[in-house]
Amino acid sequence: MPAALVPTVRIQRPDFDVAAEIAGLAQGRADIGAVVTFSGLCRDEQGTLSALELEHYPGMAEAEIKRIAAEAVTRWPLQGLTVIHRHGKIRPGENIVLVVAASAHRQAAFEAADFLMDYLKSRAPFWKKEHRADGSEGGWVDAKDTDADAARRWQSSE
Amino acid sequence: MTTRLIYFAWVRERIGVPEEDVELPDGIDTVADLLRWLRSRGEEYEHALQYPDVIRVAINQEHVDHREKISGAREIALFPPMTGG
């Protein structure tokens, strides 16, 4: 019986290297058949946005993502799971979030990554504030009902 | 007992401080009671919490709903719906 997988969760200001994170999970192993990677980037919203400021709840942000990741590990046969979420000022084109899910087969890896993102959006304590390209004060980004609906679909599939 | 209240995003901006320590009066048993009591503390609190249904709450860094009892909470955070990812 292999030891239970402990997901890697990092909350950080600096950028991350997607290729290095994939290699960190998969290198030196022969049992992984599928690695699904999701990265979320900052959009410029048709040139109107100069940056996003990501506020977070230190301590809880990491704890909550660890709770979500631990649930993913119980629901899918994963061999690796890494979640990184950045905070601070992020410019258009830069990375915000990364999920890397590794499994023997693709379906578990796809589903786990999808689940992670849906839950992370509605439960991880981060808030985005816009900085506008014209220098005017941007507002806080509103939560979307579609994100909460997306998270709920994982509850009804039991 | 002293309870630390922590605010984030527009809740923090409207209240005007990121955190504060408060002595909760008797009779404040649930999260909903706490929100009602805070709204009575001044205009800035009323502005931040005027629609209590949208306010999300964490006790000791775990999500709770508004019916949750707050006895023994060291740290209660109030914030808007989350927009990470």
Image (cartoon, helix red, strand yellow):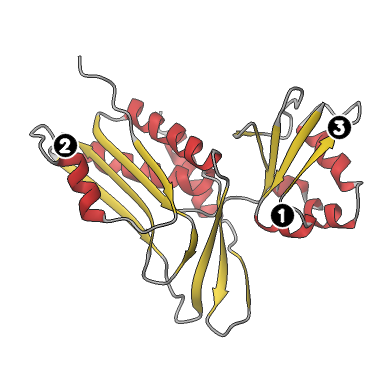
Amino acid found under the numbered disc labelled 1: Arg
What residue occupies the far left of the structure in this picture?
A30
Residue behind mark 2: A105
Q: Find residue B12 and name its label.
A: 1
| Residue B62 image point, x, y percent | 59, 33
Looking at the rendering, which quadrant does residue A78 occupy?
A: top left
Looking at the rendering, which quadrant does residue A82 occupy?
A: top left
Question: Of discs 3 and 2, which sits in the foreground?
Answer: 3
Q: Residue at x 26, y 50 (%)?
A: A37
Amino acid found under the numbered disc labelled 2: His
Q: Chain of mark 3?
A: B
Q: Find residue A65 and name its label.
A: none
Tell me the crowding category of disc 2: few under 14, some 14 to 19, or many 20 or more residues within 10 angstroms, Cα based: some
Marks 3/2 same chain: no
Q: Judge left or right: residue A105 versus residue A69.
A: left
| Residue A114 image point, x, y percent | 35, 45
Can residue A111 be seen from the camera position used here?
yes
Can residue A150 be seen from the camera position used here?
no
Q: Find residue B24 and name its label.
A: 3
Tell me the crowding category of disc 1: few under 14, some 14 to 19, or many 20 or more residues within 10 angstroms, Cα based: some
Tell me the crowding category of disc 3: few under 14, some 14 to 19, or many 20 or more residues within 10 angstroms, Cα based: some
Q: Quick one: A75 or A64, which is closer to the camera?
A: A64
Q: Judge left or right: residue B39 versus residue A5.
A: right
Q: Chain of mark 1?
A: B
| Residue A133 image point, x, y percent | 52, 82
What residue occupies the far bottom of the structure in this picture?
A134
Under tag 2, what secondary structure?
loop
Under tag 1, what secondary structure?
helix
